[in-house]
Image: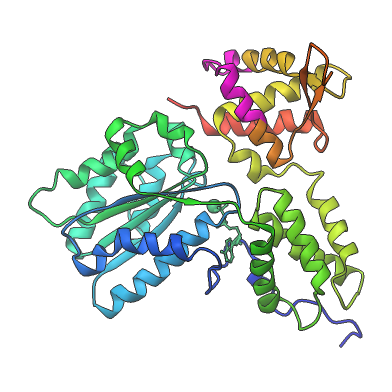
């Protein structure tokens, strides 16, 4: 064995898909989910439910719903109820209801024919399967913005209607929807929207000390004893806090810092390892972050990136950014949003760290907000957004 051993004891525990046994600081939200879906084990078939989980990137939306899924399945099993929990990421399904249903059905029948059906027929087939198996299903549609962007309000409407049409038979399909922002809700039909809005679970951004708790728990699971000193943990929590309480970013930093420690053959993950990790996470465009932006945030950012690609300046004024955004809207056939809405985008984009803002001429008459793009090369950003836009389709 080499003199230097790894600081990790179980790296898998830092994987984005790992579902921790304990979910810290989300008791209330977990309780709410349980209340909404209690009936699936107490009175299965009597009703159906739709709930909406909302929160910024890395606030634990995905893990909350998966954690809930595991625990409700356990209870259902004890009560001998054939309850299923299926978690589908709409973006991975290219925002297509057809693909979402195909994946769902393949959990029941892995060899279900892939061709020859429409989405509507697949939905009927799914209900038939549930009837045949006397099964109930909680279907989670994660990153729902992708489905709404691609297919508008029809998919959710159809998923709800198919239950309501079954007046005299058991209700079998319930939905958990996961969204980052309110905006896509505007594109839903009023009845679907109001049902979802009645059952919203909002996940607030984590505070620095909450992030520290989450990180400390992961350190215990993933690292050898004594390899991550407290000041390293505090530093990562602080950095995660400045990224809007993003637990995903924090855990990624922790993992990368561990990798640096191993590469340097350190026995401890020092703060310097964290600083190296930050440098390696920042300059690349965090694709996950851009993908999850709303359509108009993407268009605004595209406008800003193009402006910087065409000029040598370090700052763009709000007015020029708006003009550039309007051109991008025209290109993608979208009606530009108003000034007030754009301000909100600028604010939320600057909290993600992609852009930064500065007010020029404070105290003078012509006060203007100036926007800069300090961390990402404009050409890469433009390319990345254009690529994502061409994959994702548009809002209907
Ligand atoms: P979102 O879906 O909101 O972007 P995720 O559910 O993917 O966020 O969470 C990001 C990362 O942080 C995941 O690795 C997840 O396991 C972890 N995480 C989030 N919240 C908690 C928590 N309360 N306790 C433990 N780990 C958490
Ligand atoms: Mg998620």
In the displayed structure, does residue 118 sit left or right of residue 288? Answer: left
From what the image shows, is residue 5 above or below residue 151? below
Look at the image and tell me whether residue 270 can be seen: yes
Considering the image in quadrants, where does the N terminus appear?
bottom right
User: Which is nearer the eye, 303 or 237?
Assistant: 237
**Residue 340 among those drawn in magenta:** yes
Dominant SS of magenta comes to helix
Q: In terms of depth relative to the viewer, which is nearer, 358 or 105? A: 358
Q: Quadrant of the C terminus?
A: top left
Horizontal side of 235 relative to 205 (left or right) equals: right
Q: Is residue 110 visible?
A: no
Residue sitting at x 33%, y 40%: 156
Seen at 64% across and 38% down, the residue is 290
Start and end of the magenta stretch?
A: 328-346
In the orientation shown, which residue stands out farthest toward the bottom? 1
Q: Nearer the viewer, residue 71 or 379?
A: 71
């Amino acid at each position: 064995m080499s003199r230097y051993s790894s600081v990790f004891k179980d790296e898998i525990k830092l994987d984005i898909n790992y579902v921790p046994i304990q979910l810290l600081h989300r008791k209330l939200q977990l309780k709410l989910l349980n209340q909404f879906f209690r009936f699936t084990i107490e009175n299965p078939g009597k009703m159906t439910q739709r709930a909406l989980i909302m929160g910024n990137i890395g606030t634990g939306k995905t893990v909350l719903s998966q954690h809930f899924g595991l625990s409700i399945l356990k209870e259902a099993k004890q009560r001998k109820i054939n309850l299923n929990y299926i978690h589908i990421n709409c973006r991975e399904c290219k925002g297509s209801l057809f693909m979402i249903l195909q994946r769902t059905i393949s959990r029941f029948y892995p060899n279900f024919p892939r061709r020859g059906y429409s989405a509507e027929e697949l939905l009927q087939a799914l209900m038939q399967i549930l009837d045949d198996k006397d099964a109930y299903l909680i279907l989670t549609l994660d990153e729902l913005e992708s489905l709404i962007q691609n297919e508008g309000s029809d998919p959710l409407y159809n998923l709800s209607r198919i239950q309501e049409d079954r007046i005299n038979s058991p209700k079998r399909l319930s939905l958990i929807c996961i969204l980052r922002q309110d905006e896509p809700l505007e594109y839903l039909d009023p009845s679907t929207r109001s049902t979802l809005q009645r059952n919203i679970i909002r996940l607030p951004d984590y505070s620095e000390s909450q992030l520290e708790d989450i990180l400390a728990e992961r350190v215990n699971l993933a690292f050898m004893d004594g390899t991550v000193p407290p000041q390293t943990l505090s530093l990562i929590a602080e950095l995660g806090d400045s990224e809007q309480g993003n637990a995903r970013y924090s855990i990624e930093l922790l993992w990368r810092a561990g990798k640096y420690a191993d590469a340097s053959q350190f026995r401890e993950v020092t703060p310097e390892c964290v600083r190296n990790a930050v440098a390696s996470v920042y300059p690349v465009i965090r694709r996950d972050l851009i993908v999850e932006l709303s359509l108009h945030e993407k268009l605004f950012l595209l406008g800003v990136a193009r402006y910087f690609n065409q000029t040598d300046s370090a700052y763009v004024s709000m007015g020029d950014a708006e003009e550039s955004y309007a051109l991008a809207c025209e290109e993608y056939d979208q009606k530009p949003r108003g000034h007030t809405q754009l301000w909100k985008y600028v604010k939320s984009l600057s909290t993600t760290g992609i852009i930064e803002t500065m007010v020029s001429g404070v105290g003078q008459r012509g006060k203007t907000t100036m926007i800069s793009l300090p961390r990402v090369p404009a050409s890469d950003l433009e390319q990345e957004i254009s690529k994502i836009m061409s994959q994702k389709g548009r809002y209907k």
